[in-house]
Image (cartoon, coloured by chain):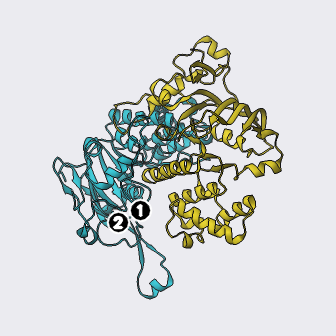
Amino acid sequence: MTNSSFLEAKGLAKYYPIQADLLSRLMGRTAMLRAVDGIDFYIKCGETLGLVGESGCGKSTTARLVARLLEPTAGTVYLQGRNIFALNGTEVQKLRRTVQFVFQDPFSSLNPRKTIMQILSRPLEVHGLARSLLEKRKRVIELLTMVGLGVEHVDRYPHEFSGGQRQRIAIARALAVSPEFVIADEPVSALDVSIQAQILNLFRQLQEELHLTYLFIAHDLSVIRHISDRVAVMYVGKIVETGTVEQIFQAPMHPYTQALLAAVPLPNPVAPPPRLTLSGEVISPINPPAGCRLYGRCPLAGPECADLDPVLRDRGGEHFVACHKV
Amino acid sequence: MPVSGEAILQVERLTTRFNLKRGTLTAVDDVSLTIKRGETFGLVGESGCGKTVTARSILRLIPDPPGEIAMGRIIFEGEDLLRKSAREMRAVRGKRIAMVFQEPMSALNPVFPVSTQIADGLRNNLGLSAQAARRRVVELLRLVGIPSPEKRMHDYVHQFSGGMRQRVMLAMALSCDPQFLIADEPTTALDVTVQAQILELIRQMIQRFQMSLLFITHNLGVVAHMCDSVGVMYASHLVELTDTKTLFAAPLHPYTWGLLNSIPHVETRRRYLNPIQGSVCNMLTPPTGCKFHPRCEKAMDICRQQVPLLREVAPGHHVACHLY
């Protein structure tokens, strides 16, 4: 881990107690869903860390922890040198100006009963960034222009816009407070392919113009490849591999990363077909067994893999892999 | 799967409309396509283009009102499905043409165990006894790769994972040995590794049962991998129709170019993608002429005036565009 990180997460964990069956409860065993189970990662200033993994791996929970929308069970997240979970009330308010969030679903993340003007003014009001109606309107129009929408959209309601346009509005809302760090949780998954491209370009453009740092979550590997500088791969609550986008996509080391890449059908009829390199099904994050989470599916697994959970180790050039066998 | 020369399904000039309070929406406009026996045909397009309505029109699953199949013929194994009575169609659905849907959680009944749901079709369509149906259910679940099928057949839909549910849907679709399968975005809601498993399973099943397949998707990678031929739909029209290799190697319609150029690739990376500018028109008040013209770099005057017809411009390659 570097000293000059913009953001650094250490031992971050989030567990949810689950109502176990009667017998287990009588025997004093509670079931714990370990959504995020002790992860470490860092993000450098101005870069995009892509967080990728399949459903249930904990990436959305991680995003919410980093945004302090959830309280962790354990661990710290240092943003610009300060632990976000150790801040007092006024400091948290300030945090909300530095860190903003864009959600996946452009249909449920905007209040359907408010106009665009109201939706975009709210953050300005909350943080005292604009007093008069004139100031607010000016800033709202500025934000709409930044995301490629027009002044004519200001007094309309969310349902009058398409999915892609709503996502632009959601991005404008995130930018209203001039944040330094934007967390985007699957922001293009709900959009059509041709609109995805527009929104991805918008993210890039805004990053360059406003010097933003991104934590970008997606399950689509091609989107991750396109938008990220560095990538972290998650599996059942753990980070299994981290590296630059070239390291991850051109020289993946962890068997799970390799499996993910092998499974992607390429939009080219003469390219090799998708391959399945893992057998079986993903284990449950509820009371996971000791040892590596991929044990039982992994073609490389050995006896030590069943007993000991591998930790992330630098294999050279800040390419971290958590595996006993590579 | 070897594709014979014979057509199993011919859709001729299909037009499906919805008569809504706020206006008439033509969801499928004069669409014609032919699927040969043994072929996997991909129908590609983005949301709202009409691909699902086309599939549902084939099986006459369009609610009437407000929907109506206003025009066309759907010739399946020599018979026009649009001329059949409701009773005759029930004998087609499930038995001769089966369908797999995108969201298994919505398509399967949550209050019945899966065995009951699969057995339902077996008993109604094939007249099997309860016992024979149960045996067949176990066989089918085993066939689609569900472990411990004798136990799991008594489970409810919510007790299965996404991939497993899709396997159950496939088992149900295959239960009566249909000749033709329609799969409407069967892997869109699934993780990439699970998708790979389900696609492989579908391939094995169509080989084994010698079926023809209409595969609906918006994912071009899936099309490239699964389909022999492809039809591209845009705003209710079929705009390009050809075999898969040609579509990717030499696409003709500007929308197809746009789609292929705008997707990020897992293998290569460009700084900015080339998206298609603008967005799909409002289908209640579509533009005159070609519906793609407001977004098309190559739009000419005629494009604003006349809807281009689908024409064969090269052997086996059809396109609806005034450029040709």
Find disc 1 in the rendering and name its residue: A280
Q: From what the image shows, is residue A129 above or below residue B140?
A: above
Give the side of residue B85 with respect to residue A6, left or right.
right
Which residue corresponds to the image point at 69% horizontal and 53% vertical from the top-left?
B94
Residue B274: x and y, percent? 43, 27
Residue B258: x and y, percent? 49, 27
**In this structure image, what is the colour of chain B?**
yellow
Find disc 2 in the rendering and name its residue: A296
Residue A86: x and y, percent? 30, 63
Q: Name the chain under label 1.
A: A
Of the numbered discs 2 and 1, the one sitting upstream in the chain is 1
Marks 2/1 in contact by CB < 8 Å: the verdict is: yes
Comparing A201 with A118, the one in front is A201
**In this structure image, what is the colour of chain A?**
cyan
Say few, some or many: other residues with alpha carbon within 10 Å of mark 2 (under 14 / 14 to 19 / 20 or more): some
Q: Name the chain under label 2.
A: A
Circle 2 SS class:
loop
